[in-house]
Image (cartoon, rainbow, N blue to C red):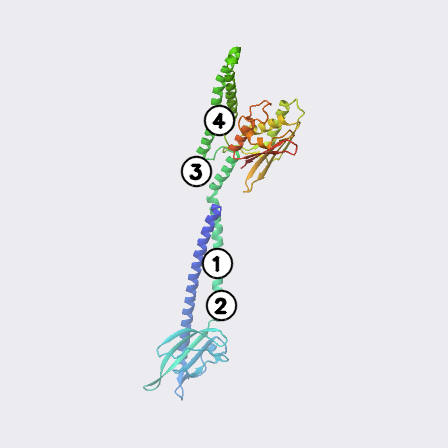
Amino acid sequence: MSSLSGRLLASVSLLLCLFFGLTIAALDLVFRDLSERSISEFLDAQLVALLAACETDDHGNVQPAGPPAETRLRQPGSGLYAVIRSDDGTLIWRSPSLLGHEMSLSKAVAPGTRRLERHKLDDESEVMALTTGIDWEIEQGKSRPFIFTVATSLAPYEAQLQRFRQQLFGWFLGLLLLLSGSLAVLLRWALRPVRQIESEIIEVEAGARAALSSGQPRELRGLAANMNALLASERRRVERYRNTFGNLAHSLKTPLAVIRSALGGDTDAARRGSLINQQVDRMDAIVQHQLKRAAASGGTVVGQAAVDVGPLLAELRTAMSKVYGHKDLLIEIASRNDARFSGDRGDLIELLGNLLDNACKWCRGHVRVSASRSLDEMGRPRLQLTVEDDGAGIAIEDRKRILERGARADEQVDGQGLGLAMVREIVELYGGMLEIVDSALGGARIVVVLPGR
């Protein structure tokens, strides 16, 4: 379970279910014990009443002198039964309530012994029976043992126990739902600062805010402060990275210009220093390359707003139309509204600018650019940029080579071979992919896939 509040609610609900289950089992055990005690006391009273009503007959047996005083003993199937037996188990008397029923009774019980146990009638209904042995004095100084049994049906008690269990389950279920609902409300209120931080982090990632808000609870105050410090440190690091490259390239650019000027002022010196001029050209290309790299942020920075690709492509199309005004160019743009770049705007300008520049340089007159958003195999968003032209295309054996710095597909065409190298470096900085294939227009088709948020 990914939700913290869900985990807490599930854990507490599980503990409540366990606690309530144990409580229900304990209450059920107590209720059953009380029921058995109540039955035992009731049977004791009935047994005493039966003994009080018994007399010795002419045959030396013991039985009630008249009809039982208890009405239920006189009604067949009433649920209250009584039996008198001799010590060898011979039936002497049984209550009229047992008419049509037979009850399995225990064997002989010694005088003075009391036994409470369950029995079954012939219709499988259960009864609780109290059996005791009595040494009955028949004559002066002469006694005879008898076995008295009083039993009551357990059906009313089982029905009462069932009703109690249903009420018990209903009460505890209602209590569980009430406590769970109350706990859910309390957890939602208690974890509201955590959800607020989560939403603010999403806004920071989207570039809608620069830092987390203050005024957090004491437990989260340190987290928010450290997160803000991390964001500020990240911005300073990127700015310092860009400034360092820019300063380095700028500091090298001036001495190179001076050397080039000095060599070019003297024809003989320039002729003798042709080799130096070549090296200066190489150094100048490196400086230009580093200046372009200084414009790149070095990857996605937390807190940057996503860049809409469509308007940027429109700006670049206008610029390319001016640069290549001598060509009858058709630059076709197809950009979805949700196509956004998660990174620095300067990086995107550098990437698309180099791709469009190459396409316009090598095309016959038609360039097509598309930008779309899709999901990868893991369900994560990604931005796909495609630039294709109707030129001569790029040979398969040259497609990997031209991505290296200083490499060109045609050495006769002006250029330093840095454009596609910059594109490859920016794509690698963002953890993307670059592919060169054949275009349906007839030329090259360059596909760039960049991860999104």
Residue 416 picture quarter: top right
Residue hosting label 3: 223
Relative to 314, 198 lies left or right: left
Residue hosting label 4: 242
As helix, strand or loop, the secondary structure at mark 1 comes to: helix
Tag 3: amino acid: Leu
* Residue ID at (49%, 51%): 181
Q: Is residue 42 visible?
A: yes
Residue 427 picture quarter: top right
State the image coordinates of residue 447 (x, y, percent, origin top left): 59, 34
Mark 4 is surrounded, within 10 Å at the Cα level, by few (under 14), some (14 to 19) or many (20 or more) other residues, namely some
Label 4 vs label 1, nearer the camera: 4
Residue hosting label 1: 171
* Mark 2 / mark 3, whichever is N-terminal: 2
Query: Residue 159 — which label?
Result: 2
Measured in 3D between alpha carbons, the distance from the residue under mark 2 to the one under mark 4, in whole angstroms, is 84 Å
Q: How many numbered circles are shown?
A: 4
